[in-house]
Image (spheres, rainbow, N blue to C red):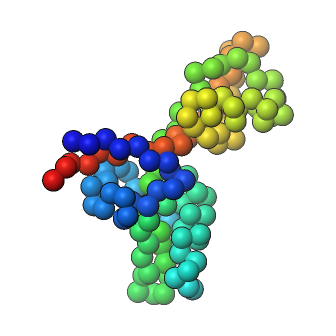
Amino acid sequence: MIRNTILATSLFATQVFGSCLYMESFTTKNDDPIPQQELVESECKVRCSEEGGVWSGYWNSKGDGNSVCQCFKLQKFSTVNDDPIWNNGDANNKCPERCSNEEGSWTGGWWTTAYGKNSVCECTKKSISVVCEME
């Protein structure tokens, strides 16, 4: 088995890993038509991001003229650093760095676990680990 890690922001499963990608995926709820082939990449990246995922590189034009994008679900986690966060402004200053320090991106979420003592930030993984069998 080979374990590969790739950046979610540059994931193109069809080019990099073909059919050996094993992880949870979904198709977008937004199925508006994508009018031009040249717009697929940018449109699917936006649609997947809006629904909490990253584009897999696959998309499909449905029979009714509408289009859906296949996305991979991003893993969420809360930060290990749990120093207090006092308000949304404080979270805006602290959480992006906390998530980045743990190889993640801040989702905008945070909560206090013990008032005046501990608060955590919600992050998503920046990279996706995949397992492929070598042939």
Q: Is residue 131 left or right of residue 48?
A: left
- Camera-side residue of 14 and 116: 14
| Camera sees residue 32 | no
Query: Looking at the picture, does residue 121 appear above or below residue 115?
Result: below
Query: Looking at the picture, does residue 128 appear above or below residue 37?
Result: above
Q: Residue at x 68, y 22 (%)?
A: 119
- Camera-side residue of 72 and 4: 4
Q: Residue at x 53, y 75 (%)?
A: 40
The furthest residue to the top: 117
Q: Residue at x 47, y 69 (%)?
A: 69
Q: Position of residue 90 (x, y in %)?
A: 81, 29
Q: Position of residue 92 (x, y in %)?
A: 78, 36
- The quadrant in which residue 79 appears is top right
Query: Looking at the picture, does residue 85 appear above or below residue 129?
Result: above
Task: Please give the count of numbered marks on the rendered protein.
Answer: 0
Q: Residue at x 79, y 32 (%)?
A: 93
- Camera-side residue of 71 and 101: 101
Q: Position of residue 12 (x, y in %)?
A: 44, 61
In the picture, which quadrant includes the N terminus? top left
- The quadrant in which residue 124 appears is top right
Query: Looking at the picture, does residue 53 appear above or below residue 64?
Result: above
Q: Position of residue 25 (x, y in %)?
A: 40, 56
| Camera sees residue 28 | yes
Q: Is residue 104 left or right of residue 98?
A: left
